[in-house]
Image: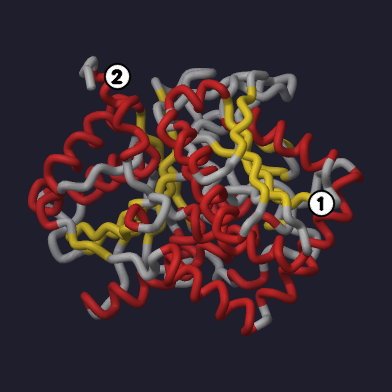
Amino acid sequence: MTATPSPAVAAESIDRFSLPDAGGHFGRYGGVFVPETLMTALQELGAVYEKARLDPVFQAELKNHLKEFAGRPTELYFAERLTRHCGGAKIYLKREDLLHTGAHKINNALGQALLALRMGKKRIIAETGAGQHGVATAAVCAKFGLECVVYMGAVDMERQALNVFRMRLMGAEVRAVTSGQKTLKDAVNEAMRDWVTNVRSTHYILGSALGSHPYPMMVRDFHRVIGQETKTQLLAREGRLPDEMIACVGGGSNAIGFFFDFLEDKSVRLVGVEAGGRGIKRGEHAARFEGGKLGVLQGAKTYILQDPDGQIELTHSVSAGLDYAAIGPEHAYYRDRQRIDFAYACDDEVMETFQLVSRLEGIIPALESTHALVHGLKRAKAMRSDEILVINLSGRGDKDVNQVAKILGVSL
C-alpha cells in the first residue's frame, strides 16, 4: 500500500522541542494513565531524566558506552544493487543492524540502564516481542551487573527461540506470558503487573516510544542519535538532505529517532510503515491507521485497533516486533499534523523483499525492517534518479531465519 503524499510543505511550522508538554501530551495524545501505585515511580523517573538530559557527565558517559559497547556511529550505506534494481532514486540504508545485539534497541537500553543506576535500582524488567529489546536489555544488565527479568509472549518465544537463548545466555530470566494472544501486548501487561508489585526496587526499561510520560519522550531522545548521524553522514556524502526517509513502525522507537531531527526540514518526506499482516481485515493486521481509533492502552492515549465496545482487537504480523495494537503517541500527533505519512506492508510482500535484499545486497534484514524496505523499494521506483531515499535498517534478520525457513518450507 502506498502512502498518500503529504501536504507537509503547506502545514504550519513544527516546533519539535515544545513537546511533550508538562503532562506528557503530544496534542491530544500521550499523557499518564496508570495505577496510582506507579505515579511516584514515573515522577521519580521523569525528574531523574530531566537532570540527566542536561548533565554533561551523563551525556558523556552515555556517548562513550554507545561508542565502545554498542558500536556507534553506524554506517550510512549506499545500496548500489538495490538502486540499480529499482531504476529510480539513490537508496541509502542506515545500518542500525550493525549495532551490538543486532538492532537499534541498544541505544535506549543503555540510556535507561544508566538512569536505573542513578536511581539506585538494581532490578530491571522489560517486555519484548521480536526479542531484540530483550536481548539489548539482557546485554546492558550483564554489563552493569543488574538483575534482569524479561517478559515475552509464548507465541513470540516460539518464533524467536534464538533470541530467547541469547537472553538466557547473558543471565536474564525470560518469563513466558500465556495470557491473551501470547504476544507483545500481553508481555507489556505482565511487565506492568510486575512493576506495580516491585516498584521500589525495580526499573522498567520500556522498549518503545509508548506508555506513560516520560517514556515516549525519553525513548525518542535516546534514539535521536540515529537521525543525527544520518543527517551528518548524508550531508558529508551528498552535500544535501534526502528527499524521503522511511522506517518501520510498531510502537515507533526506531522511526521517531530516525525522523526527529528532520521534522523541521519540510523538503524531506517522512513515511512510517506499519504491519499489514495478511491484509486489512479485523484481526489480520497491525496497521493502526487502517481502522484504528483514539483510545487508551497501557498508559497512553493514542490510535488503537479496537472494536466498537473498546475491546482491543486481535493483531497479526509475520514480524513479532510490529504485532501491537497501539502506536506511539508522538507518531499519532505528527500524522494529524500531516508531517509523517503512514503506509503498510503485508506479509507476502515482506517475505519476497526479505529474500530480494538478502540476495542483492548480502544483507539479511529483520522482518520488522523489511516492512520499511517493501515500501522503500516501491517509492524508489517512482522517484527520479537524482533524488535520494534513506531507509532505516533498524535490525538484522539472524533472529528470523528459522521462522522464514519454516514459512518457505525449507529444512535447516
Disc 1 crowd, CA 10 A, few/some/many (<14, 14-19, 20+): some
Residue 205 on image: x %, y %: 65, 51
Kindly identify the residue that appears in the image at 75 percent across and 43 percent down.
299
Give the side of residue 276 with respect to residue 194, left or right: left
Horizontal and vertical percent for residue 275?
A: 43, 33
Amino acid type indicated by mark 2 = Ile
Taking the image as shown, residue 393 lies to the left or right of residue 355, namely: right
Q: Which mark is residue 407?
A: 2
Rendered image quadrant of residue 292 = top right
Quick one: SS at disc 2? Answer: helix
Q: Few, some or many C-alpha atoms within 10 Å of disc 2 (few <14, some 14-19, many ≥20)?
A: few
CA separation, marks 2 and 1? 42 Å
Looking at this rendering, what residue extends furthest in the top direction? 409
Count the marks: how many?
Answer: 2
Give the residue type that dot 1 points to. Ser
Q: Residue at x 55, y 71 (%)?
A: 13
Q: Nearer the viewer, mark 2 or mark 1?
A: 1
Residue 9 appearing in the image: no
Q: Quadrant of the N terminus?
A: top left
Sequence-wise, the earlier of marks 2 and 1 is: 1
Against 330, residue 292 (above or below) is above
- Residue 183 visible in image: yes
Q: Are marks 2 and 1 in contact (CB under 8 Å)?
A: no
> Which residue is under mark 1?
201
